[in-house]
Image: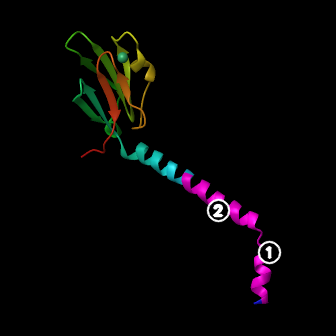
Amino acid sequence: MEKQHIEKRIVPWKIVIFSLAMTIVLGSLLAVWIIISSFKTSNTVAKVYQEGKEIYSVDLSKVSKAYSYEILGTHGERNLLLVEPGQISIKEASCPDQVCVHTGAIDSGLIPITCLPNKVIVRIEGTPD
Ligand SMILES: [Zn+2]
């Protein structure tokens, strides 16, 4: 009985609260890290949508040499894709804002490349079937 009493007094409540807080912080950091790394590793298939329809898809993990792929719209719109090992970008575009070109290369499902004027979306989403 006496020993228990002493141990209780040795551990101040501040340390208990601190370790609880650290556990919560580290736990959420770990959770975020797991979510981000699963985005990075499991999603390797880039899909290209034009006017809401999937027109092209490529597994970026299987690309060994960079190549270009041209997307042409029905009213003269043009987007030039650059497919590289592990990443994809829009190199050239006929759109006035050039937002898609300035987005740069993407390698995960976190951010898609969107070209609003040409109605083109490039997104990395699924695992290969
Ligand atoms: Zn654009």
Residue at the image point whose x is 50% and y is 53% from the top = 31
Residue ID at (47%, 45%): 36
Per the image, label 2 sits on a secondary structure element best described as helix
The crowd level at tag 2 (other Cα within 10 Å; few <14, some 14-19, many 20+) is few
The span from disc 2 to disc 1 (Cα, nearest Å) is 17 Å
| Percent of width and height locating residue 120 | 30, 22
Q: Give the range drawn in magenta.
A: 2-28
State whether the magenta stretch is mostly helix, strand or loop. helix
The reply, left or right, for residue 119 in relation to residue 84 is left
Check disc 2 and report the residue beneath it: 20
Q: Quadrant of residue 19?
A: bottom right
Asked if the stretch drawn in magenta spans residue 6, the answer is yes
Percent from the top left, x then y, of residue 90? Answer: 37, 21
Q: Residue at x 36, y 24 (%)?
A: 114
Nearer-N-terminus badge (2/1): 1
User: Which residue in the rendered view is the most extreme toward the left?
Assistant: 74
Q: Is residue 55 left or right of residue 93?
A: left
Q: Is there CB contact under 8 Å for labels 2 and 1?
A: no
Q: Amino acid under label 2?
A: Leu
Residue type pointed to by label 1: Ile
Which numbered dot is residue 10?
1
